Image (cartoon, rainbow, N blue to C red):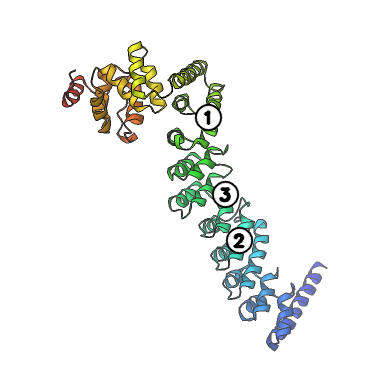
Amino acid sequence: MFSFFKNFQEKRRQKRYDVQKKQLAAGDGKNWLMLAQDEQTNPEILYYLADKGDAEVRRAVAHNKSTPLKASSLLAQDRNGDVRLVLAERLLKLLPTLTPERHSQIYAFTVQALGLLAQDEMLQIRRALTTSLSDYALAPPQVVIRLANDLAREVAEPILRFCIALKDEDLLDIIAGYSAPWVVVAIAHRESVSENVSNAVVNTHEVEATTALVKNPGARLSTEALQSIVERAKDHPEWLQPVAMRKELSTELARQMIGFVDKAVLDMLEKRSDFDAPARKQISEMVGRRLSYLHDAPEGETEEHKAIRYIKSGKMTPDVLADALAWHETDFVIFGIAHFAEVHPQVVKRIVETMTPKPLVALCWKAKLPMRFCIEIQQRLAKIPLKDILYAKGGTEYPLTVDEIKWQLEFFGIES
């Protein structure tokens, strides 16, 4: 019985196919359009019409669910934009039902056609792809990468911001060759941003992108990235509050921030419960001391006169010097170092202006300042690049030998 039914169905299909071939052979435009629209039309005939039919026929073929997907690449290059747009809409509806494993050949045809459409000259087609693929987790990587690199913002931005099919290596390549700031801003707004991508965003020095990054709770920031952000935050106060709230903020970076943030941010740092008790105590003391130092100056008093006042009253200490450095009171710091090293302030100024680490480290040694504080002096007073800074040996010890220190001091006429 089953065999009889199967044979009957096969005969019906063959009879229908024979009728369709005659309609095709007649070459009549009306018949061709009917064939193109009919989901019962044989796939071979639909493939033929995709190539030979007029624009209306080809559009109907692109819309027809029975059109074989191997015709997609042909239709994706059709000279008529409406045909390509209809094909794009059909493929985008079909894509979520396909997987590379279950439909390897069909999936390959679909992805190949979408790849061609992702480069289409019609903005409407590329936007249609972006709208559908930006929030589709299994979007074909080769397609979304093309869309992410599109020069049109309305095409690329949703992909850059929302599409999780983009991998870190893709994002890093895009950042390396970005053509406009909005590209990096979109990446900084992603729901999840890895440390490597965050580093790349920070290294572009795009202000809007960095602002988006520090405010993004889904962005992971490395110590290096936060260090760079904290250093630049003096010029971008809008970063300070979100940075103070970052869970990655170390106590060391918090200490650095204390010198140049307003009271609201200081209060925020002081209340950070995730810092251990000693760190919280130290930060609280620093906040109080630096606020006190900032307000301890008669109106119109110069930094030089303030330093002389502190020296004469016996209040000049390394901690006070650190407070002055944090508030960028350069002249005060120079006079303070000169006081501790027992040299003329002009000698200190000359050494600072060389922007060379060794003589400055030797001077700090002469002034009996902690080597860890000397690192801040190199970086923040002399503006020595991070790659050239001399760091403490073993965490606290001076990195130069006594002979090296003496040589550096003698070069500037300083007795050791």
Q: Amino acid at mark 3?
A: Arg
Q: Earlier in the sequence, mark 3 or mark 2?
A: 2
What percent of the width, then of the height, locates residue 70? 60, 69
The N terminus, quarter of image: bottom right
Label 2 residue SS: helix
Q: Nearer the viewer, mark 3 or mark 1?
A: 1
Mark 2 and mark 1 residues within 8 Å of each other at the beta carbon: no
Residue shown at 50% from the left, 57% from the top: 149
For the residue marked with disc 1, what is the amino acid? Ala
Q: Is residue 258 above or below residue 174?
A: above
Examine the rendered structure and indicate whether residue 192 appears above or below residue 293.
below
Between the residue at mark 2 and the residue at mark 1, the CA separation in whole angstroms equals 39 Å
Distance from label 3 to label 2 (Cα)?
15 Å
Q: Is residue 295 visible?
A: yes
Task: Determine which residue is flagged by label 3.
Answer: 161
Q: Nearer the viewer, residue 288 or 208?
A: 288
**How far from the left and from the top, in percent, is residue 37?**
73, 75
Q: How many marks?
A: 3
Question: Which residue is the extreme one toward the bottom?
Answer: 26
Q: Disc 2 or 1, which lies upstream in sequence?
A: 2
Which residue, given by chain and number where applicable, does mark 1 sit on? Answer: 244
Q: Label 3: few (<14), some or many (≥20) within 10 Å?
A: many
Q: Amino acid at mark 2?
A: Arg
Secondary structure beneath label 1: helix
Q: Earlier in the sequence, mark 3 or mark 1?
A: 3
Q: Nearer the viewer, residue 112 or 355?
A: 355
Q: Which residue is mark 2?
A: 127
- Taking 227 as reference, is 85 above or below it? below
